[in-house]
Image (cartoon, grey):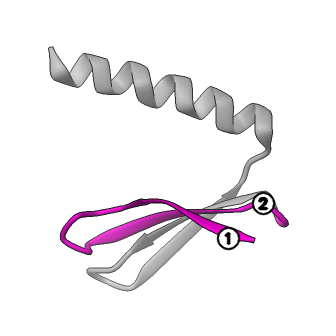
Amino acid sequence: MTKTLYRHPDGMGTIRHDAQTQTLHLINALDGTEAYALIGPHGLRELAAKLLALADKLEC
């Protein structure tokens, strides 16, 4: 099952996760490219922590 985690408000890109294949998909709607990475529960938690830290840093 694929779940959309984030969709750019202007439709320029999407981040999705496929639980069955444990892949994270990044889709660039502007040029039609797509990238993916294998990532399980531990990796998702680690990525989430790093994204939160980055967001905090960018707000300062």
Q: Position of residue 7 (x, y in %)?
A: 36, 64
Q: Is residue 27 magenta?
A: no
Q: What is the quadrant of the N terminus in the image?
A: bottom right
Which residue is at 83% across, 65% downward? 21
Residue 19 — which label? 2
Query: Are the residues tagged 2 and 1 within 8 Å (C-beta)?
Result: yes
Mark 2 or mark 1: whose residue is earlier in sequence: 1
Q: Position of residue 31 (x, y in %)?
A: 31, 83
User: Which residue, given by chain and number where applicable, does mark 1 sit on?
Assistant: 2
Tell me which corner region of the image, top left, top right, bottom left or bottom right, holds residue 10: bottom left
Question: Which is more toward the observer, 31 or 51?
Answer: 51
Q: Position of residue 56 (x, y in %)?
A: 29, 18
Q: Is residue 16 magenta?
A: yes
Q: Which residues are magenta?
A: 1-21
Tell me which corner region of the image, top left, top right, bottom left or bottom right, holds residue 17: bottom right
Residue 35 — which label? none
Q: Secondary structure at mark 2?
A: loop
- In the image, residue 27 above or below residue 41: below
Which residue is at 45% across, 72% downward? 27
| Horizontal side, residue 56 vs residue 38: left or right | left
